[in-house]
Amino acid sequence: MNHDTTHTNNNHYDTIVIGAGPNGLTAAALLAKSGRKTLLLERRPILGGLAASEEFHPGFTAPGPLHDATTITPEIVKDLNLTAHGLRLTDTPPPTFIPQTEGPGLLLHRDPKKSAAELTQFAPSEAEAYANYRAFLTRITPIIQTFLAEPPPKINPEGLAEIWPLLTKGIAVRRLGTRTMSELLRLPPMCVADWLNEWFKDERLKCILAIPALLGSFAAPWTPGTCALLLRHEAMQGSYAPDGPLALIAALASAAEKYGVTIKTSAEVANINVENDTATGVTLSDGETIGADRILATCDPKTTFLNIILPDRLSNALDRGIRAYRSSGVVAKVNLAIKGRLTFASRPDLVVEHAVIAESIDQMERAFDAAKYRRCSDNPILDIRVSSPDDRTAAPTGCSVVSILVQYAPRDLDAGWTSDSSAALGDNVVSRLATCAPDIESQIQAREVLTPADIESRHHCTGGHIHHGEHALDQLIVRPTPQAARYATPIANLFLGSSGTHPGGGITCLPGKLAVNQIMTEERR
């Protein structure tokens, strides 16, 4: 989708939103729906940010680095009536398959009832444990969701009105009962390996459950705090778009246009203009200056504060905090255009939409070891999405697109990213995939390799980090810095609303919505 809407003569807006990813589109649509004159600026010629789908070979279109469409927040779908804009949703995400070179692999549904027969046949000791595991998560995730769906708490709350939400959350936790509450309270600092080992013995099952906690993060199964990332992922599970991120972006853009958002693509913001510690507008790279009462930046925090605001506009504390914010990516992306379907030798008749390549928790840990020393893993973890056989927007009839996230490939590769190292990464990924899908090499018609350096360049996200900053305990709630953790910043009328703010990355659209709520709160004061 390409937009180039001409500005009106009145070159001043109530709000300018910078960046047209899922959060920017959500924020712009909500602001316009509330009656605010809103301008949405996107530096690229297409919308979608890290979720944008792009053609990489004639007839073949792959999703961006954010290729998981299972975390769309239902409340936002309702607020913007996205189903009326063509978004098709279901509450049932596709099952995940983990193949084996020897053995049948494992096909796992989120619903334990749907997985009962599979587990009984291929991992008989785990069927009851998985049902109990899901039941426990069902009990605790509503509590976690309340924390994620609201701004982070104030560090120094004032008065009963600000303290009361914390008290109600504490009461809700207490109502879980002593046993469940005690279990919930001990989990966040734990490593995901320890917790999953308490539940399960089957390595395939543990790998499937662990990988969502690790994707995009400089962390491995034995890293403290990764259990918190697993709980975050579980709580973020929302509606699933079977037509992928492309359908969500199209629906958000359609809603934004309906509510009157002015959308301008190929419009790079060179500077956020600041006068007397107050944001007054933006200057584009072509020299055009546009005024605004409010500015909402949904680009990553480092880009916002270190690239498009003059350095002397930041306080020393904010400057130090932003520079210390960790945002060096460890994920690469490999797109394959293939004939036919991706077929795994362990289940040749199985139609797979989501697969994970990993052998064990310890193998996943060893894959991370290379990244510690600025090397790519020889046996990376692969998170694979395969286009639906019915999706003609992705591939021609009889063909498929295979989208692969490669964990771990560090942005700061010791030898630097070159065409040779990029090609070597692609070769390694295909070779690793071929151990489970031996026909893949003969099926490939084209491939695209996006290293973290390529992701940084294409999507203009610092460090090529797909979550706009590391998901870690110290960067989850106080995100990106204490001075800007609640969307408002020390610069008056400048707000943040990217994945670099609470509650973090993924296609949830929540940071954009929460930032809009903060803007409206500020305006009422």
Image (cartoon, rainbow, N blue to C red):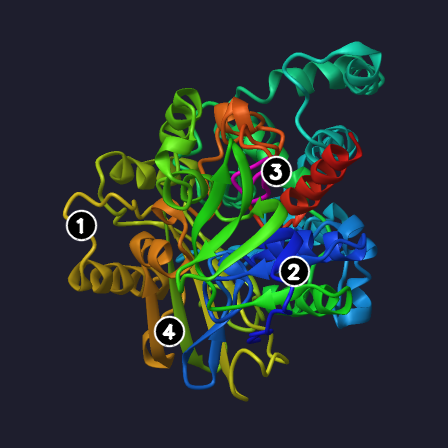
User: Can you tell which quarter of the image residue 157 is in?
Assistant: top right
Q: In the image, which is nearer the foreground, mark 1 or mark 2?
A: 1
Q: CA distance from mark 2 to mark 3?
A: 42 Å
Q: Which residue is mark 2?
A: 94
The one of 497 and 201 positioned closer to us in this rendering: 497
The amino acid type of the residue labelled 1 equals Gly
Residue at 64% across, 80% down: 390
Image location of residue 244, percent across then percent down: 62, 66
The amino acid type of the residue labelled 3 equals Asn
Secondary structure at badge 4 equals helix
- Callout 3–callout 4 Cβ contact below 8 Å: no
Q: CA distance from mark 4 to mark 1?
A: 29 Å
In the picture shown, does residue 389 fall above or below 466? below
Task: Give whichever of discs 4 and 1 has the lower sequence position.
Answer: 1
Q: CA distance from mark 3 to mark 4?
A: 52 Å
Residue 441 placement, left or right of 416 = right
Residue at 75% across, 63% down: 89
> Please, what is the dominant secondary structure of the magenta stretch?
loop
Image location of residue 101, percent across then percent down: 39, 58
The one of 405 and 156 positioned closer to us in this rendering: 156
Task: Give whichever of discs 2 and 3 has the lower sequence position.
Answer: 2
The amino acid type of the residue labelled 4 equals Ile
Q: Label 2: how many residues lie within 10 Å, few (<14), some (14-19) or many (20+)?
A: some
Q: Which mark is residue 440?
A: 4
Report the span colored magenta.
493-504
Q: Which residue is mark 3?
A: 493
- Does residue 480 appear anywhere in the picture? yes
The amino acid type of the residue labelled 2 equals Pro
Q: Which residue is mark 1?
A: 416
